[in-house]
Amino acid sequence: MSDAMTVEVRQRLRTLLEADEQIYTISALKREAKDFSYGELRREVTRREFFEPLHDFAVTFLASAGISQESSKYYGALLKFYTIFRLQRMQRATASLYLVCFAHQRFREINDNLTDAFIHLVGQYEKQAKTEAETAMQKALEDALKSLQAAGQVLGLFVDESISPELPFSAVREKAFLLLDKEQFPIVADYMRKIAFDKGTFEWAYYATLSRAFKQNLRHLFAALDFAGRIENAPLMKAVNFLQDLFKRDKSPRQVDIVDFPIDVIPKHLLRYLYVPSEKDRRRKVLEPDRYEFLVYRILRNALEAGDVFVQKSNEFRRLEDDLINDEKWKNKIALMRELNLPLLSRPIEDTLAAFHESIESLIERVNQRIDEGENKHIKLKGNGEKRRWNL
C-alpha cells in the first residue's frame, strides 16, 4: 500500500481522517442519502466526486495485491465499526487499506443510489404526465359536449337569411367566435367528426410543465453516471453521450442547433409528439428539445431496468461479464474446474438435470398431497373432477 499510493491518493486518504468544523470528513462521507430529494442527491453526487480517484486507484491496487472482492468488502465494512480515533491510531498503511476498500465500495454504492434515484424519478414524472393527460383528455371531452349547442348556433350562421351575402367572411367569423371560443373549434370539430382524442398529445404537452422539475432533479444525476450499452443500443448511447457532453460543458439543448441532435433514438410512433410547429413558421415542424431530453431519460430508464444498458463501476447495474471469469483465465477451464473440486462442475450435465428433476418432482407431489388432504389451510378447493378449482 505504501509503495503503490500516489501523492493525490495519499492526500485524499489524509483528508478522510482530518476534522472539518468539528465533523470528521469520513463521518460525513459514510452517510447515505435519506431520500430522493434534490439536496440529498446533490450531496451524494459530491461524495461521488470525492471518492472517484480513490475508487480508480483501488481497482488497480486490489487486483495487483491479489485481494478478492469479498476481502475488499470485509475491509471496507470495518469502517462501520472503527471510530475515527481508532483509525488514527492504527498503522498508517493498515488504515489506508481499510479506507481504500471503503472508498471502492462506497463509490459503487453511490452509483447504485444515483441510478435508483434516476429510475424512480423518471417513473414519477412519467406517471404524473399520464395522470394529467387522462384528466386533460376527459376535460376536453366534457368541454366538447358542452360546446355542441354553441357549435349548432355557429352552423346556423350559414343559413341565416339576415346576414347579407356581401358581408365579408372575416365578419362572419367574428360572429362565430362570439358564439364559440376560438380555442374550442378544433376540439368540437374533432368530436363531431368522431376523431378520438389522442392521449399522447396531452401527455407530451404536459412535459413542458414538468420541464423545470426534471431538468433540476434529473440532469445532475444523468451527467454524473457513466452509462454503457451493447451494439443494439447504439442509437440510445449516441443520444446519451450527446446530452451528457452538453451538460458537462454547462450547455442546454436549447443552445444547440436542432440538426445536431441524434434523432435515430426517437421511435417512429413518437415522432409526431416530439416535433412541434416552429415559432418562426407555424407551417414547419421542429424538434422540441425538452421533450427530446425526457424521451432519452425514459428510454434509458427502460433499458436500465431491462439490463440492456449498464452503469460502469456499479454493483447493482453492472454488466453480466463483470461477474464472469475473463477470457484469458477461461482458456484453462479444465484445470480451473479441477482445482475447485466441485462435483456439480465435473459430472455430465444430463446427470445433474436428472437429479434436479427427480428432486423437484417429489416436492411437487408432496405439495399437491398436502393441498389434497387439506393440510395447507391457505388454499381452498371447490368442485370435483374437471370442474375442480382452487384459490389462495
Image (tube, rainbow, N blue to C red):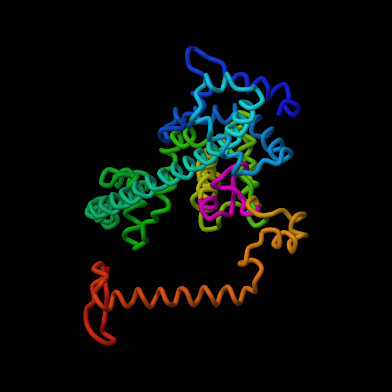
| Figure quadrant of residue 61 | top right
Q: Decide which of 134, 275 is in the foreground and name it.
A: 134
Residue under the image location 41 percent in, 73 percent down: 363
Q: Position of residue 174 (x, y in %)?
A: 32, 43
| Figure quadrant of residue 51 | top right
Q: Decide which of 5, 143 is in the foreground and name it.
A: 5
Q: Quadrant of the C terminus?
A: bottom left
In reply to whether residue 307 is colored magenta, the answer given is yes
Q: Position of residue 269 (x, y in %)?
A: 51, 58
Residue under the image location 66 percent in, 25 percent down: 93
Q: Quadrant of the N terminus?
A: top right
Q: Is residue 61 visible?
A: yes
Left or right for 183, reference 332: left
Say if 10 sits above or below 252 in the image: above
Q: Decide which of 74, 295 is in the foreground and name it.
A: 74
Query: What's the magenta region?
Result: 302-321
Residue under the image location 57 percent in, 33 percent down: 102
Q: Position of residue 359 (x, y in %)?
A: 47, 74
Left or right for 233, reference 63: left
Q: How many marks?
A: 0
Left or right for 167, reference 48: left
Q: Which residue of the protein is positioned furthest toward the top in this rendering?
A: 21
Q: Position of residue 213 (x, y in %)?
A: 43, 34
| Figure quadrant of residue 100 | top right
Residue under the image location 39 percent in, 56 percent down: 198
Q: Is residue 280 visible?
A: no
In reply to whether residue 311 is colored magenta, the answer given is yes
Say if 343 sits above or below 46 in the image: below
